[in-house]
Amino acid sequence: MTQAILDVLHDVMTSPWIYLALFALAMLDGFFPVVPAETSVITAGVFAAATGAPDLLLVIVVAAVGAFAGDHISYAIGRTTNDRLRNGRRSRKAFAWAERALAERGGLVLVVARYIPGGRTACTLTMGAVAYPRRSFALFDALAAVTWAVYSGVIGYVGGAAFEHDPIKGLLLGLGIALAVTVVVEAVRHLRRRGTAPEAELVTSGD
């Protein structure tokens, strides 16, 4: 069973169409976050180290360009459907977080949002909804897309290099690193919220 999975993955990763597939997944993930874009880039990184194909640099480039394009589509959706999205029952909390983060950190929140489940889409939609300057959005989004693509590709490559003869274990290691980073980011956010809550209460009571 494991060998069959490896054979299928090897066929996929050595196909010349893999770069187009990675581009499409990274783009779709910008406005349809259930698409496994990060997992796909990590997997490509694993096989780049373990088998030499696909090419890691090309994986990073197409993933970054796809993510950049997808974020701009999400931004455009936010500009045209802001009221409907903002008042949605499921999206309300995500929009509230994105607006607070945008007010605190500006465009750099795009980079942080890459590592928060659902944060990327909420952030890009919100930036479109509040008419964040498109040129500034493009600048920060380029930084976010490139760092995300490098991060995903490299941790996959690290996993593949560590388990050169067992890509499945390399993939598990890469996904484990990605999950650990997400958990750390979420923990920091939780601690920050707990730290700022008492301050807000003090300000309110002082008024």
Image (cartoon, rainbow, N blue to C red):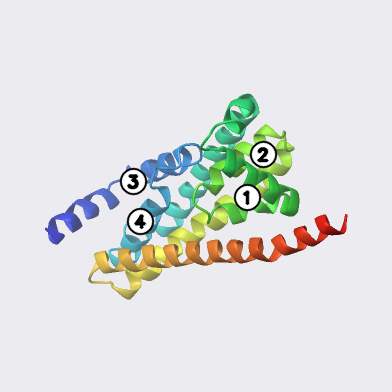
Does 147 sit above or below residue 121? below
Q: Residue at x 39, y 41 (%)?
A: 20
User: Mark 2 near mark 1, Cβ–Cβ under 8 Å?
Assistant: yes
**Disc 4 target residue:** 44
- Give the amino acid type for the residue marked by disc 1 in the picture: Leu
Instruction: Give left or right: position of 129 versus 186.
Output: right
Q: Position of residue 157 (x, y in %)?
A: 39, 66
- Quadrant the N terminus occupies: bottom left
Q: Position of residue 39 (x, y in %)?
A: 38, 54
Residue type for callout 2: Met
- CA gap, disc 3 to disc 4? 9 Å
Which of 160 and 183 lies nearest the eye of the viewer? Answer: 183
Q: Position of residue 76 (x, y in %)?
A: 61, 30
Q: Which mark is residue 18?
A: 3
Inspect the image, locate mark 3, and give the three-letter code of the amino acid beneath it. Ile
Q: Which residue is mark 1?
A: 110
Residue that label 2 marks: 127
